[in-house]
Structure formats: C-alpha cells, structure tokens
Amino acid sequence: MKKDSRKLNEPPKRSILEEVGNAVTHGVGALCAIAGLVLLILKSHTSTQLFCSIVYGFCLVMMFLMSCLYHSFRWGSTVKRVWRRFDYISIYLLIGGTFTPMWLLFWGGQLGTILCCVQWAIIITGIVFVAVFGPGRPKALHITLFIVLGWCGLIFLPRMLRENLPLFLFTLIGGVIYTVGIIPFAMKKKGAHFLWHFFVFFGAVIHWFGIYFFLY
C-alpha cells in the first residue's frame, strides 16, 4: 500500500531542458509577482485593501516560487517529492488569494466575508489532503476542486457586468485561460506541463491587471 502511494505521488520524469524551462518561466513569474505585491500595497488606501493586497500578493508570489523550486530539483530526489506537494498546495493558495479581494472589496459586507471564509475553508481542506496523502491520491479530486473553486467566481459575473465591465472582462478572460490550461496540466505528453506554465502566467497577469486597475 505504501509503495502504491509513493508511486502515485512520484513526480513525472521530464527532460532536464523541460524542467529548466518550467523553473525559469515561473521564476520570472515570482519576480513579477513580487513587483505586483509591492504595487498593490502602495495602492492600498484602506485597511481592507491592504489586507487583500498582502493576502493576494503573498499567495501569488508563493505559487510561482513554489513551482519554480519544485522544478529546480533533480528527479527521483526526496526533496523534489516534497516540493511536488508544495506545488499543488500553491495552486490552492493562488485561487484563495485571487478571490480574497473579489469577496472583500467587490462583493463586500458581511456576506462577502462569510463567502470568503467558506471558500478558504474548502481550500484549506484541499491543502490538508495534499499534505497528508500527496497530490496523486487522488489527482482527479484536486483537478475537480481547482475547476469548481475557480469557477465559483461565476457568482460575481452578473453584478460585474452591470457595475464594472472592465473587471468583468479581465476576470472572465483570466478564468478561461486558467481553465483551458487544465488540459495540458492533466496530460502526460512531453512539453505539456511547460505549456501549462504559460497558461498560469498569463492567467495570473490578466487577473492582476483587472484587480489593480479596476478593483482598487
């Protein structure tokens, strides 16, 4: 049973060139995310905005940084197996971090706070599953949660369409980019994961621009 569990959680074997590409793309993403965090903090005028900036910016940095580090280690090493868990955890963090300013700044009020807490409770549950059982047990659960948690943003769209069309467009386009990116993420073909990294990078950039320019 333990051997089967380890096999399920074993990182996929990729070429050195592909792993270098994976590490570099999200290493650049981490640097961009740090700059994005600073800009969000500088633009914050209220305590709620500052809180959202720190949570969102921190989660964005962690997502790119954890992914970069995971792909930087040698295949077959214990440290790479450990960082694979962090790589999956970082996706949950990205979802929660991105939605935090949406719930607290756009939706607002007591209901926004409650819904934000509910989503984070589900995210923390997913993180615990990854930490305890690993990302491969079961992988389908995590992919399903990524999609469901990400598209719970549909609740915002009707109101955004009425009140903030630019934010609506940036939110929708970013969500579509992430969702389409799930296809190469779930595939085992050579180069598919490298392609997934570009979907993540551009999805994150689109959402950041929407939040920075049209929510604050």
Image (cartoon, grey):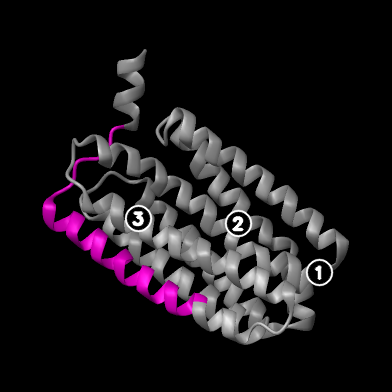
Which quarter of the picture shows residue 104? bottom right
Q: What residue is drawn where x is 28% and y is 44%?
A: 188
- First-in-chain label (3 vs 2): 3
Q: Assign a secondary structure to mark 1.
A: loop
Disc on res. 196: none
Residue range of the region highlighted in magenta in the rendering: 10-37
Q: What residue is drawn where x is 52% and y is 59%?
A: 94
Q: Is residue 1 visible?
A: yes
> Closest to the observer: 113 or 151?
113
> Most prominent secondary structure in the magenta stretch?
helix
Which quarter of the picture shows residue 30? bottom left
Q: Assign a secondary structure to mark 2.
A: helix
Mark 1: amino acid: Gly
Per the image, the residue denoted by label 2 is: 96
Q: Is residue 158 visible?
A: no
130, above or below 41, in the image: above
Please identify the residue farthest to the front as the structure is shown: 47
Does 110 sit left or right of 156 as displayed?
right
- First-in-chain label (3 vs 1): 3
Q: What residue is drawn where x is 25% and y is 60%?
A: 23
Per the image, the residue denoted by label 3 is: 67
Mark 2: amino acid: Gly
Which quarter of the picture shows residue 4? top left
> Closest to the observer: 162 or 41?
41
Q: At which x and y percent is residue 17?
A: 12, 57
Residue 184 belongs to magenta span: no
Mark 2: few/some/many CA within 10 Å (<14, 14-19, 20+): many
Does 11 sit left or right of 36 as displayed?
left
Per the image, the residue denoted by label 1 is: 108
Q: At which x and y percent is residue 33?
A: 44, 72
